[in-house]
Amino acid sequence: MKQIALYGKGGIGKSTTAANLSAALAGEGLDILQIGCDPKRDSTRMLMHGSWIPTVLDLIREQGDRNITTDEVVFRGFRGVRCVEAGGPEPGIGCAGRGIIATFQLLERLGALDGDVILYDVLGDVVCGGFAMPMREGYAQEVYLVTSGELMSLYAANNIAKAISRLSKRARSRCRLGGVICNAKNMEGERELVDEFARRINSAMIAYIPRDRIVQLAELHRQTVIEYAPDSGQAGVYRQLAADIIRNQRMSIPTPLEMDELESFALEFVQV
Ligand code: ADP
Ligand code: MG
């Protein structure tokens, strides 16, 4: 079983990438479990054709965690991908990371953490507590950083690289960086910038995903691009990413940058 995590800044395109990746992997006949670890709880929505599945945290709040069954938290979406949403606290109270911890504990007790690939879709703005859990407790062995060329999304990616680097020093930790995924914002020099960022943190850019309106069109039709426009170039990009991740052997311990280093080299690319 392969366990991978996609981390990145909020709104950068993690869930879009994750859902299309799951759909592409399922198209290869693999049994996929996608776990949304973001209080936004929409990781699996396109796989579920627009429906908001109940979150683990909602269920625990309503009925405690003792009586919850697998069927109440794991839902089958497009191509049989199994979908779970951790959920988040009620606004203003509680800790968002709690939902992730509770989700892992529950899925483990239910014996539901199985399949050929488990894909964790994790908010990476804060790498504390629950948000670090997928990489901290030996679940995800491969982390992929989703970023654009914008400074704040590189900043978030760099922070996650710091967390991986720190965790990799633990004797039992198998968490490694699998690569950087550039989900483009169509900035000038963006591809080169993200490619260089990946190199500087001792990794590689594993994919360049163009910004394409087919993504919004698919979203409006409540589908992944893989389902809505299987013959499009964008669907091809997601399928290629799936193939590259499956055979990826290049795992590294990242070397994160200092903030001023990040700023000054980003400036070089923006000024070109
Ligand atoms: P995250 O999960 O990181 O918060 P989402 O996957 O929800 O981000 O993406 C945020 C928005 O950006 C969505 O409305 C999505 O349709 C759009 N988006 C993501 N990737 C692309 C892309 N490659 N091209 C066009 N729009 C995109
Ligand atoms: Mg998301």
Image (cartoon, rainbow, N blue to C red):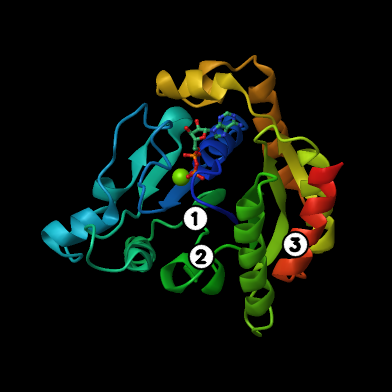
Q: Earlier in the sequence, mark 2 or mark 1?
A: 1
Q: Residues within 10 Å of mark 2 (few under 14, many from 20)?
A: many
Image quadrant in which you'd find residue 2: bottom right
Q: Residue furthest bottom?
A: 171
Please name the residue that numbered disc 3 is placed on.
Answer: 262
Please name the residue that numbered disc 2 is placed on.
Answer: 134
Numbered mark located on residue 205 in the image: none
Q: CA distance from mark 2 to mark 1?
A: 8 Å
Image quadrant in which you'd find residue 112: bottom left
Q: CA distance from mark 2 to mark 3?
A: 26 Å
Q: Earlier in the sequence, mark 3 or mark 1?
A: 1
Q: CA distance from mark 3 to mark 1?
A: 23 Å
Q: Residue furthest right?
A: 272
The amino acid type, in three-letter code, at marker 2 is: Pro
Numbered mark located on residue 122 in the image: 1
Q: Nearer the viewer, residue 11 or 107?
A: 11
Q: Residues within 10 Å of mark 1 (few under 14, many from 20)?
A: many
> Residue 105's spot in the image, x, y percent?
35, 68
Is residue 213 found left or right of 92 in the rendered image?
A: right
> Residue 146's spot in the image, x, y percent?
63, 48
What residue is at 74 percent from the left and 68 percent from the top? 260
